[in-house]
Image (cartoon, grey):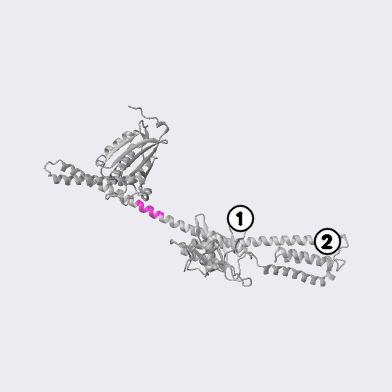
Amino acid sequence: MPGVRPSNVGPGTAAGSQPARALQGRIESVSDDPNKKRTAIDTDRPWGFQSGSALQQYGIAVGVVLLVSLANFFLGPLVGVHATALIFLLAVVVLALFVERGPTLVAATLSAVLWDYFWLPPVFAFRVTTFEDGILLGTYFVVALVLGQLTARIRAQERAKRQGEEHATALYLLTREIAGAADLDGILQRVVQQMKKTFEADAALLLPDTADRERRRLYSGSTLQMNDTERDLATWAFIHGCPTRSTSGHPRKVEPEAVFLPLATKHGKLGVLAVRPDKSARFTVPQRQLLDAFAQQIALAMDRHRLQQESETAKVLEESERLSKTLLDSVSHEIRTPVAAIKGAIGNLLEVQELSESQQEIVAEIQEANERLDRLVGKVLDITRLESGHVKPRMTPCDVTDLIHIALKETKNDLRRHKVGSKTAPKLPLVEMDFVLMQQALMNLLSNAAVHTPLNSSVEVGARIDDGALLLTVQDSGLGIAPECIPRVFDKFYRGPNAPTGGTGLGLSLVKGFVEAQGGQVGAANRPQGGAIFTIRMPLEQDLKTPLPSA
């Protein structure tokens, strides 16, 4: 079925729809309380009892009093004046068992007036001649009102209790039905069936489309057929999170109203529940209250199903990642053995003196490839250790100058075709960090600069104190980093679009893991004069801010 686009719907209207344009100016609040988000369309007719039922109860009350008066005309000469008052009182009490409080009060007042006019001397006059008769008339009137009120209150309490039990039973049946559904389609199907059983009403569930365009889709198993205007109302209810209802739009044409209740939880909006009664023109107040409770339970069931699906997806992803880590770890360890054997064989070949120049070049290429493979395996093992939480930094006071010197020495072969320099601030203090992990992080940054910058370009390592922290920088004079790549340069296996072949995308990810394991931060940016700069920020301990004594 065609859906409705909420993005094209304004406050109470749907753009491009002729029925929707007719809705303008017909939206108003049902409640004066601004905290209650209940809105209805065409609120000239209130939710509740119809006027015909109320008039019928008043007519019954007046008719009963007139019948009792007729009976008292025949019984009065036999039982006496005061006995007729008791007959009137008995009629009022019995009447209160079947009608509401208003008709009961009318019956009590009318019976007292009729008894005073037709039976209490002087008859055919609203006049009390004796004090005893006045006391009797007043007592009758008070007793009739009190008994009528008490009886009506007991009836109201009994009716409320019965309605509460019925509502609780209906909610239990709904909860039991939707709890046994295996998927979302099962939930929707059982909701429609339960609406039919409980309210004798047609129902439909409209859900957001999972595609990019936000549309409503009508559940295929629904029993409610909706026109364009009702779809616009459902969309309005979904967008604003307020219930709406449809009307016939004609004062003499009474049609069943469709009620549209938004389904939402604290996690967001889920859809709209549309319900239209089969027979009555509208839902009563208790039915509306039960509908609201149904909508809440349906929303919770749908949200629970969504959370269950997300949990299952997360478990699958977690298991898949665990298996991939195990596979990487196993493969890396298995590769280490042949790599060591190749390294030993190359060493033996280099000791042979009879190798020609071409053979020596081949051996050198094998040695370089073997070292690269050895570094790759080491990076895979390091990333596996980081993700498994097995990296426990040993924090000790370290000399930053020694750290930079050793890192440059270890990457001398990678940077042999670059202009390398260092710039450290004088009298740097000792910094609390893991020397080995920080050395590996700095070496990865230097190797990364060597790979991603042109030959004979400059690479500079710096260290200084800034705002209570040590800043280690590695900057180059290459082409820099594409702006869209900067947020992802430290992601695992991420390589830029112009990255040279042969890399794995693990080096910068290891830098981030090693630094953050020590409580530091790492960032990347482009230099204004060209090239990239990577910055490691390590916080300083208070007792380590004293600089080293100068030599």
- Which quadrant would residue 443 be assigned to in this image? top left
Q: Identify the disc placed on residue 235.
A: none
Quick check: 87 left or right of 276? right
Foreground residue, 456 or 503? 456
Location of mark 1 (residue): 34
**Residue 353 visible to an observer of this rendering:** yes
- Amino acid type at mark 1: Pro
Residue range in magenta is 314-322
- Circles 1 and 2: CB atoms closer than 8 Å: no
Q: Position of residue 291 (x, y in %)?
A: 57, 62
How many numbered callouts?
2
Please indicate whether residue 155 sits to the left or right of residue 238 in the image.
right
Membership of 316 in magenta stretch: yes
Q: Secondary structure at mark 2?
A: helix
Magenta span includes 320:
yes
| Pair 1/2: label in front | 1
State the SS at label 1. loop
Q: Amino acid at mark 2?
A: Leu
Point out residue 487 in the picture as x, y percentages from the top left corner.
38, 48
* Quadrant of image for the C terminus: top left
Using the image, tell me which numbered label, if any, was put on residue 136.
Answer: 2
* Image quadrant in which you'd find residue 86: bottom right
Which residue does the image show at 39% across and 30% down from the upper left?
546
